[in-house]
Amino acid sequence: MTDVVAAAEAAVRAYPGSTKVVAMLMEKNPSTLASELLEASASKLGLRDAVKISQVTGSKAILNAFAEELGCTVISIDHRLSGADPLYLLSQLGASFARVLEVEAAAASKARPNYNDLQEIEKRWLAHVAIGQEIVAYLRAAYDHGKPESMKAPRL
C-alpha cells in the first residue's frame, strides 16, 4: 500500500504550491496533510482525503496506484460518447478494434517492439475497452430504467 501513499505524496508535491495549497483547497490543516503523507508518521491518509487530493490536483496517480495494487487497470471513459445511439457505439467499437489490430500488427512485425509501440497499443486497447464500457452503461441504464433500486442490475 506504500505505492498508493507515495502516489498521493507525488500528486500533492507536483501541484503548484504543493502541500500548503492542496491542504487549503481541501480545507485541511497543511501540517496534518503533510503528516498523513509521511510513511513514518502515525497519521493515516484516509480514502476521503485521497479522493479530495485527486480532485484538487487532477492527478490520477492515486487511482492508478490503487488499481495496480489490486491488479486492475484504470480506464478513462470518453464522455463525448455518453448517451450516444447504441448502433453508433457499436460502429465505434468496430473501428476502435481495427485500429488496435493495426497497431499490434505493426509492432509484431518488428523483432522487438519499442516503448512508443507499447504506449500506442495500451492507449488503443484502453480506448477500445472504454467504448465497450459505454455500451454496457447504455444497456444497464436501459435495463434499469423505471425499476426500483431493489430490482436494478447488480454491479460486478
Image (tube, rainbow, N blue to C red):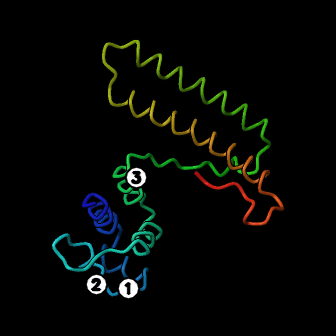
Q: Residue at x 27, y 77 (%)?
A: 36
Q: Residue at x 38, y 46 (%)?
A: 71
For the residue pair 88 and 2, the one nearer the viewer reads as 2
**Taking 9 as reference, is 71 left or right?**
right
Q: Residues within 10 Å of mark 2 (few under 14, many from 20)?
A: some
**Secondary structure of the residue carrying numbered label 3:** helix
- The image shows residue 119, relative to residue 41, as above or below, that is above
Task: Tell me: 108 left or right of 136.
Answer: left
Check disc 1 and report its element: helix, strand or loop: loop
CB under 8 Å between discs 1 and 2: yes
Mark 3 vs mark 1, foreground winner is 3
Q: Quadrant of residue 30?
A: bottom left
Farthest-out residue, right:
146
How many numbered marks are there? 3
Residue carrying label 1: 28
Which of the two discs, 3 and 2, sits closer to the camera?
3
- The amino acid type, in three-letter code, at marker 1 is Lys
| Residue for badge 3 | 67
Identify the residue position indicated by label 2 in the image.
Answer: 32
Residue drawn at x 44%, y 46% as measured from the top left:
73
**What SS does tag 2 mark?**
helix
Decide which of tag 3 and tag 1 comes sooner along the chain: 1
Ranked by sequence position, the earlier of labels 3 and 2 is 2
Q: Which residue is most to the left?
A: 40
